[in-house]
Every structure is written in structure tokens, then in C-alpha cells.
Image (cartoon, rainbow, N blue to C red):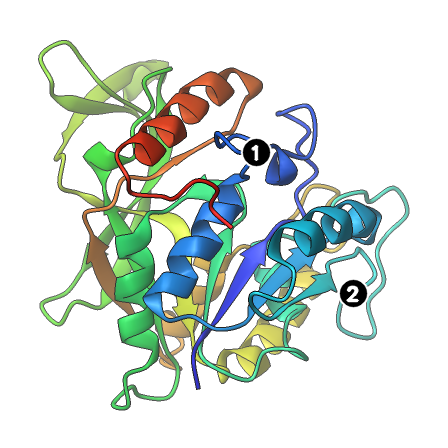
């Protein structure tokens, strides 16, 4: 059975000013997730599952059916406020869903194979899907195993300004031990990379980071046995945080809890692929230029589908 690819596309795009998941950035109107789908299918993935909001369904139906037709199997699942374990219900005034860990849980009824899960609006590169697929088809994985594709820090920096990244540490067996959040990371004129860390008396200090440090860009791989764990952990999260209007349960928290409880481990997979994405509307022109360049170089065909 070929692995499934889950694409998390339920974000509202408030900072971007619209549904960036469906914004045509490629030279033929391709979306960023089109490139992920193309690369994943080429790497050996099978079915594609889109996690969307019900309010997006008409737009996704229109774009996806017209573009993909019957060239591969895909389906939609919805991530709504109300889609949470009993006995909980969303409090009055809550507007956003419950985060990427919740998004994973919504796919439990339609995924019965090992699967990758990614953001819709990030460009990951073919190699990321190749290394993830090779992991997911392994026959020697222990129960509770999962994987994170780690990107070299130097391949995730933005030319527009500082970024935040989760710097990943692993042991001699290549298993994730912890993720340390670093903030205001950027490359300076001397080509060195620094982040800002708190100092004494409200001062800040700079810490040099290695270009080869691995960071998480929300490209994960799981076995189907993650779903009972996710059901329990999301329920525990809701018991503590449901009344907090901005609370969200994210995939790194899910993975950390599985590791710390001894219920599984996370393999760190390395890729030399370059990540890029669109967080703000100002990022758009740079992404458009990079995608055009990839087509000119023959890495992607015209049109993609």
C-alpha cells in the first residue's frame, strides 16, 4: 500500500489577505500545494487528503476537480470547531479550529495507511517527499514510530527579514530528543547566522547558529497507530485549555508528548531541499520568481498537471 499525503489547508489566511492555499503563484496558475502533490506522487505517494474548512469546499471543489480530474485519488475532510472529542464543545466566541494536532485527528476515518502530513502553503521540494516515502514504507518500524523531515537552517531563511524556527536535536540513533524554539533568526553581512535570546535586565543577546542546524518545517510522517494517541492527547488538551480563546494543539506538541511518555519515537530525516513559503502578501513576488525559475530550469513541466 502506498502512503497517503495529508495536506493541511484549513488556515484562514488572515495575515495574507485571502486563501493563499488557492493562490495561483506558478507560471500556469499553479498553487504551492500543486507542487507538493506533483512531487509526492512522483516520490511514490498514493491518495491525497485535503483538510479544509467547510466554507472552503466550493472553492476547492472548483479548483481541484478542474485541475486534477481523475489523474489521482483525492478527498476532502473538514476541520471545524465542533469536530472535537466528547464531551467537549467549543466555547462561545471561538472562531479558529484547534491547531495542526487537531487537523491530524480529523483524518482518522479516511486514512488507513502510513501517511505524511504537510502545510498547504509551504514549498518542500521533491527530496523531502522521497526521504519521507522511504521511511513510511519501511517494514522494520516499531509501534509508535514517526518521522520529521529536518531542513538545514540555511535553506529556510527569508531574504525579507528575521524568522522563528524550531531547532531540532537528535541522538546518535537519529531520533529526535528535543526542539528548541529560536527567534529573530537572520543572516548578517558576514554570512553568519544569529538569533536573538533574552539577556539580563531585559537586554537581548545574539547567539550564533550553524547553517547546518536542522529545523522543523511541519513535514511529518506517521503510522496509523498515531490516531488513538492523538484522540487521547487532544482530549487531555481540551480538558485544560478549552476556555482559552487562542489555544491550539500542534503537531510538535503531539510528537513531544509521545516521545516523553515512551509510546514512540521520532526519526529525524535529513533533506538538502530548499524550503520556501508565503506568510505575508509581501512574500508573494519572491515566490512567484522562484517558481518561474524552477520551470525554466526544467525541474517542473509546463503545465504541472
Q: Is residue 242 left or right of residue 220?
A: right
Residue drawn at point x = 20 percent, y = 56 percent: 270
Q: Secondary structure at mark 2?
A: loop
Contact (CB < 8 A) between labels 2 and 1?
Answer: no
Relative side of 215 to 253, left or right: left
Q: Secondary structure at mark 1?
A: loop
Q: Evaluate whether residue 131 shows in this view.
A: yes
Number of disc labels = 2
In the picture, residue 269 is in which quadrant? bottom left
Query: In the rendered image of this protein, does residue 73 appear above or below residue 66?
Result: below
Q: Is residue 303 left or right of residue 105?
A: left
Q: In the rendered view, does 101 fall on the left or right side of 58?
A: left
Q: Quadrant of residue 2?
A: bottom left
Please state which of residues 66 and 273 is positioned toward the viewer in this rendering: 66
Residue 83, numbered label: 2
Q: Which residue is mark 1?
A: 29
Earlier residue among tags 2 and 1: 1
* Residue depicted at x 81% and y 75%: 86
* C-alpha distance separating marks 2 and 1: 33 Å
Image quadrant containing the N terminus: bottom left
User: Could you tell me residue 192's position as x and y percent?
Assistant: 11, 21
- In this view, 304 is above or below 229: above
Q: Residue furthest right?
A: 92
Amino acid at each position: 500500500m502506498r502512503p497517503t499525503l495529508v495536506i493541511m489547508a484549513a488556515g484562514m489566511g488572515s495575515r495574507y489577505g485571502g486563501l493563499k492555499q488557492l493562490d495561483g503563484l506558478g507560471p500556469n496558475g499553479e498553487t504551492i500545494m500543486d507542487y507538493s502533490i506533483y512531487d509526492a506522487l512522483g516520490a511514490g505517494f498514493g491518495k491525497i487528503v485535503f483538510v479544509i474548512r467547510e466554507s472552503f469546499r466550493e472553492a476547492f471543489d472548483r479548483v481541484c476537480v478542474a485541475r486534477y480530474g481523475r489523474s489521482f485519488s483525492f478527498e476532502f475532510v473538514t476541520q471545524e470547531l465542533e469536530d472535537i472529542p466528547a464531551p467537549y464543545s467549543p466555547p462561545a466566541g471561538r472562531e479558529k479550529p484547534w491547531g495542526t494536532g487537531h487537523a491530524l485527528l480529523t483524518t482518522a476515518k479516511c486514512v488507513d495507511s502510513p501517511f505524511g502530513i504537510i502545510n498547504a502553503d509551504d514549498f518542500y521540494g521533491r527530496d523531502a517527499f522521497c526521504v519521507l516515502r522511504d521511511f513510511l514504507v519501511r517494514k522494520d518500524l516499531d509501534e509508535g514510530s514517526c518521522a520529521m523531515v529536518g531542513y538545514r537552517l540555511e535553506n529556510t531563511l527569508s531574504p525579507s527579514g528575521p524568522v522563528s524556527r524550531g531547532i531540532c536535536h537528535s541522538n546518535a540513533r537519529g531520533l529526535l530528543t528535543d526542539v528548541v524554539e529560536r527567534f529573530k533568526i537572520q543572516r548578517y553581512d558576514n554570512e553568519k547566522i544569529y538569533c536573538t535570546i533574552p539577556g539580563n535586565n531585559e537586554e537581548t543577546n545574539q547567539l550564533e547558529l550553524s547553517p547546518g542546524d536542522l529545523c522543523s518545517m511541519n513535514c511529518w510522517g506517521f503510522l496509523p497507530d498515531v490516531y488513538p494517541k492523538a484522540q487521547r492527547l487532544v482530549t487531555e488538551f481540551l480538558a485544560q485549555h478549552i476556555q482559552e480563546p487562542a489555544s491550539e494543539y500542534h503537531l510538535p506538541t503531539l510528537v513531544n508528548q509521545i516521545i516523553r511518555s515512551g509510546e514512540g519515537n521520532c526519526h529525524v530525516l535529513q533533506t538538502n531541499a530548499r524550503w520556501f513559503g508565503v506568510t505575508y502578501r509581501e512574500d508573494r513576488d519572491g515566490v512567484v520568481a522562484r517558481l518561474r525559475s524552477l520551470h525554466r530550469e526544467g525541474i517542473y513541466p509546463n503545465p504541472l498537471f
